Each structure stands twice: as C-alpha cells, then as structure tokens.
Amino acid sequence: MTDDPTDIPTDPRAAVDALADHLTATAERPVPPATNRWLGEAEAVARDGASEGLDPETRRKRVRQAADLLESAAETGDEIADDHIEAAKQCCRVVLDGDGL
C-alpha cells in the first residue's frame, strides 16, 4: 500500500496500482458518508483497473471512471484522506496523459 501521498509514480502502469492503493487508504480514514460512497466506488473501479490481464483500453477506461468519481467527491475534512485523494487524482493524470499501460 502507498503510505506516502506525495509518492506519485511517473510510469502509467505503476500509477494505476498507486491509484488503487491511495483510494484504499481513504477507506481507513474518518470520511463523511456521502463522500465515502464516491470514494468507495472509485476504489472498486480502480481495483478493477489494476487487475492483471486487463487490456490497456479497458484499464484506461477504468482510470477515467475513477477520475470522474473522484471529481464528485467533496473534501473530507480529514487532511490525510484529502492528501490521498489528491494523490489519486495525480495518478489518474499520469495514466490518462501518458503513453502505454
């Protein structure tokens, strides 16, 4: 699991794994229920995107879905959770702006 929210991989495939890890880390934080629903859905989609054997197009689609869900999540009021959410968004950008998976 990614413990350091500032650790953003530059490799798109590694960023998919880090995205899932950052979202998993938010589940361990005190997050308001409404925001937690968005984060839980984003985590599920990101975990699917990080699974082995997924073709690059589907993996990119899952990351796009996670990014869209993250845009709907409000700030949590928990600094650590917010740091992980920001890191997750950055991981999405690495994947969506990068070449190859």
Image: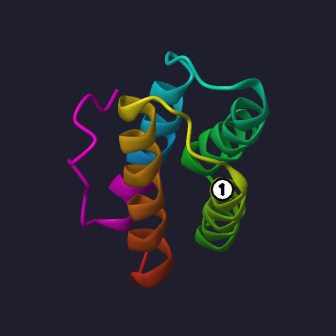
Q: Is residue 82 visible?
A: yes
* Image quarter in which the C terminus is found: bottom left
Q: How is the image coloured?
A: rainbow
Q: Is residue 101 visible?
A: no
Which residue does the numbered mark 1 point to in the structure image?
Answer: 66
The residue lying toward the viewer, choosing from 49 and 79, is 79
Disc tally is 1
Secondary structure of residue under mark 1 = helix
* Image quarter in which the N terminus is found: top left
Q: Which residues are magenta?
A: 1-16
Dominant secondary structure (helix, strand or loop) of the stretch shown in magenta: loop
The residue lying toward the viewer, choosing from 69 and 32, is 32
At a point 79% along the width and 33% down the height, the residue shown is: 34
Residue lying furthest front: 77
Q: Is 64 left or right of 92, judged from the image as shown?
A: right
Question: Three-letter amino acid code at disc 1?
Answer: Ala
Picture coordinates of residue 99 (x, y %)? Answer: 40, 84
Q: Is 8 in the magenta?
A: yes
Picture coordinates of residue 75 (x, y %)? Answer: 56, 44
Picture coordinates of residue 78 (x, y %)? Answer: 45, 29
Q: Quadrant of residue 91?
A: bottom left
At a point 36% along the width and 42% down the height, the residue shown is: 83
Answer above or below: position of 73 versus 25. Answer: below
At a point 61% along the width and 61% down the height, the residue shown is: 63
At a point 30% along the width and 33% down the height, the residue shown is: 2
Q: Is 37 left or right of 17, judged from the image as shown?
A: right
Classed neighbour count for the residue bearing mark 1: other residues with Cα under 10 Å, few (<14), some (14–19), many (≥20): many
Answer above or below: position of 40 versus 57. Answer: above
The residue lying toward the viewer, choosing from 15 and 86, is 86
Q: Quadrant of residue 30?
A: top right
Picture coordinates of residue 27 (x, y %)? Answer: 57, 22
The residue lying toward the viewer, choosing from 64 and 69, is 69
